[in-house]
Image (spheres, rainbow, N blue to C red):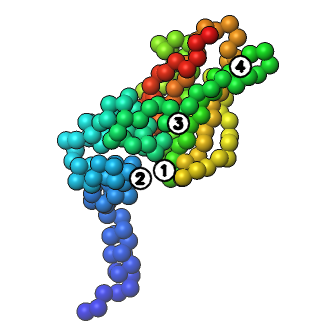
Amino acid sequence: MKPSPLWIAFASLSASLTPLPAAAAQTDDAYWRWASDKFGSERASNPGLESSLWGETADPDRDGLANLLEYAADTDPTGWTPAADCYQYSLIPEGNSSRPQLTAWIRTDDPALRVLCQVSPDVSLWSPELPADPAAIPPHNPHVLSLETNSYSRGLRQLRFMDAQMIGGRHSAFMRLNVVRGKSVVAGPPIQPFSF
């Protein structure tokens, strides 16, 4: 007996609602494809190596840049990378003073990737404070001015952030970049770019 067209349509719909096996779901993930390319698919599929080698918070080359930051900036996680390859600092003159600025190039092919720039007067207190839930990170940051650049290169987009506070009477200023993806949040190293 031949199945009716209605049964065939139902069977097709049911098959499309079946969850993908974990391995198939991994290959659809942009970060996993990057980790597989950088570390090899066999090693990137090994859960025992996640915390030390291929995971988003791992730092296998011990350069102080977690894999998620190297992924976002498209740098090499297998060889030492200076923070300046991920983002650069500068002072932008403004009137009689200046503002600290952080410039970064971030990949454009992962819609789950977000960046947040933080500022600090002393490296112990960062603004804005990161919430416990990465999904709750606000899209607007009153402490940092985000500047649109419309500059693209090699699949990366240039982002510029300026400290909302002028240098004024401060003795130091710190900025760092945080990368957020899913439940992972990694912070770039808190480098003191400016001492006055």
Residue at the right extreme, as displayed: 95
For the point 32% across and 31% down, the residue is 62
Asked if labels 1 and 4 touch by Cβ distance under 8 angstroms, the answer is no
Question: How dense is the environment of label 3, judged by Cα within 10 Å: few (below 14), some, or many (20 and up)?
Answer: many
Residue at the left extreme, as displayed: 48
Residue 173 seen: yes
Asked if labels 3 and 4 touch by Cβ distance under 8 angstroms, the answer is no
Asked if labels 3 and 2 touch by Cβ distance under 8 angstroms, the answer is no
Task: Measure the alpha-carbon separation of dots 4 and 3.
Answer: 24 Å
Residue 185 seen: no
Residue 183 position in % (x across, y down): 39, 37
For the point 66% across and 23% down, the residue is 91
Residue 30 position in % (x across, y down): 41, 52
Mark linked to residue 98: 4
Which of 85 and 166 lies nearest the eye of the viewer? 85
> Label 2 belongs to which residue?
30
**Three-letter amino acid code at the position of disc 1:** Asp
Which of 46 and 13 lies nearest the eye of the viewer? 46
Task: Measure the alpha-carbon separation of dots 1 and 2.
Answer: 6 Å
> Could you tell which of marks 4 and 1 lies nearer the N-terminus?
4
Task: Measure the alpha-carbon separation of dots 4 and 1.
Answer: 34 Å
> Label 1 belongs to which residue?
110
**Three-letter amino acid code at the position of disc 2:** Ala
Query: Under tag 3, what secondary structure?
Result: strand
Q: Closer to the camera: disc 4 or disc 1?
A: 4
Residue 63 position in % (x across, y down): 36, 30
